[in-house]
Amino acid sequence: SYTFVGWVATSDDVYDENSGIFKMGEEAVTMTAQWEVTKYILTIDPNGGIYDGDTNALIQIMDFEDEYVVLTPTYEGFTFDGWEADVDGYYDSETNKVTMGKESLILTAKWIDPDAENEISAGKVARINKTYYPTIQEAFDAAGETWEDNTVWLIKDATENPINGTRTPFVFNLDGHT
């Protein structure tokens, strides 16, 4: 995939790049289109885990049809459950390879928390690290003054009434945090 970047003329007197105006003289002029390869961004988000030694998302600048082999991330206490792609068709889960298409791609790690099923059965709906809470508000309250390393994870849809399937809106007191 290419992006048009401008014109080049055989005579400097014919084309003004700043204004984009052509001035045709008495002689023949050849105009040649200039193109550059379009760059796309592959973002690999470890989603709380570690990818290639880092907890931050990896940003890879790629050309159309470039390939990238995706590594397997780690997250202590969790089982890796594959990658979720925001665009279909670029990531092959069989080979763990991305072949860049004509738009940027985000891969987000999916994790299985082995303790979540037991905690959900016990009525818990949210967690911070490995601590589970019966309400999301309690999880937010427990996050404390500093929210660093205190991501509140929703482990169950707490808005759904199991009896009639209706949903109740959430209201959170974030105590000034966003």
Image: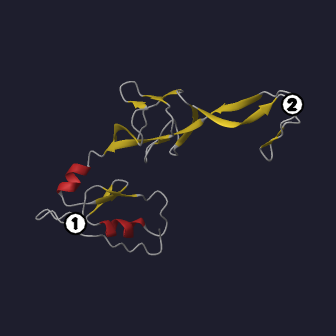
The residue located at (67%, 32%) in the rendering is: 36
In this rendered view, identify the residue nearer to me: 17 or 78.
Answer: 17
Name the secondary structure under disc 1: loop
Pair 1/2: label in front: 2
In this rendered view, identify the residue nearer to me: 24 or 131.
Answer: 24
x%, y% of residue 175?
Answer: 44, 75
In this rendered view, identify the residue nearer to me: 48 or 167.
Answer: 167
Q: Tell me the tag on residue 11.
A: 2
The residues tagged by marks 1 and 2 sit, at their Cα atoms, a distance apart of 70 Å
Of all residues, the one furthest to the front in this rendering is 26
Circle 1 packing at 10 Å, graded few (<14), some (14-19), many (20+), is few
Name the secondary structure under disc 2: loop
In the image, residue 158 sits, relative to residue 92, either above or below, namely below
The three-letter code of the residue at mark 1 reads Arg
The residue located at (31%, 66%) in the rendering is: 136
Q: Which residue is mark 1?
A: 167
In this rendered view, identify the residue nearer to me: 97 or 133.
Answer: 97
